[in-house]
Image (cartoon, rainbow, N blue to C red):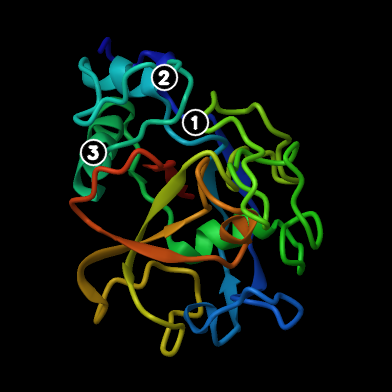
Amino acid sequence: MKSKDLAAAPDLAVIPPGDFFMGGIEEDKFVTAVELPRHLVTFERGFAMAKTPVTRNQWMLLMGSPPPGEAHGLHGECPVVNVTFHEANGYLRELSAAFGENYRLPSEAEWEYTCRAGSVTVFPHGGSLDIGDANFLYDELGNPVGCGQATPVGQYPPNPLGLFDLLGNVCEWTADAWHPDYVGAPCEGSAWSDHGKSGCRTIRGGAWDHLPRVLRASWRDWAPEQSHWDNLGFRVALSL
């Protein structure tokens, strides 16, 4: 990559400081124990979050080769998938070196804070999810209603902070180790990296092959750090 090739730089949204209640809400019938207890998280400083997941084109431009688990047949503006947690961090190290910034994965708290964007509902915009809101495959009755594959980023409406594809399209790695609940979770928004399930990281957002219940703002799951999954990518965060 040419030094300072701006096409490789992430398009970032500045996220203001503030606080929110993280975790499942009482009105949500799909909440499980892993989304509890609901707890207050306070961000004393703002941060930046990429408006979209990292795309295949961005990866190619920066790294000079396809992603290690290249998914054939996908548009170049589709999110990168089939990258492990460590491969995602390798990309972020290269990106940081190219632009002189400390790019990183978002914490799980940062991810939910930006996803909710001030909302206190099951989904950021209300209590249900329509096929025009995000890329998912099945409705809650199990009927296929989506396109059945990842789509180019930015095809669905942004949230109030200007971020796209937080719900659906691909799940996203976070920096946090996996914990089966929020007992003892940090309250200042940092990544929860200690005493988690060894070799496993929290993922967020739901994906193109999921049901709406997996695209809820509080949904969380885990993946082994070495996972190459065709529905798992990542986005860039930056401390300010």
Residue type, numbered disc 2: Leu
Residue 98, position in %: x, y? 28, 25
Residue 13, position in %: x, y? 60, 39
Q: Residue at x 63, y 36 (%)?
A: 146
Task: Between residue 83 and residue 5, name the one nearer to us.
Answer: 83
Residue mark closest to the camera, 2 vs 3: 2
Residue mark closest to the camera, 3 vs 1: 1
Is mark 2 in CB contact (under 8 Å) with mark 3?
no
Q: Which residue is drawn at 62% across and 37% down?
A: 164
What residue is pinned by disc 2? Answer: 74
Q: Give the left or right position of residue 107, taking residue 114 as reference.
A: left
Q: Residues within 10 Å of mark 1 (few under 14, many from 20)?
A: some
Q: Give the left or right position of residue 82, taking residue 135 as reference.
A: left
Q: Give the left or right position of residue 18, taking residue 11 as reference.
A: right
Say above or below: 55 vs 64.
below
> Marks 3/1: CA distance?
29 Å
Compare marks 2 and 3 and give the one earlier in the sequence: 2
Residue mark closest to the camera, 2 vs 1: 1
What residue is pinned by disc 3? Answer: 93
Of helix, strand and loop, which one carries label 1? loop
What residue is pinned by disc 1? Answer: 149
Is mark 3 in CB contact (under 8 Å) with mark 1?
no
Q: Which residue is drawn at 28% across and 14% down?
A: 3
Residue 149, position in %: x, y? 49, 31
Task: Between residue 88 and residue 100, name the one nearer to us.
Answer: 88
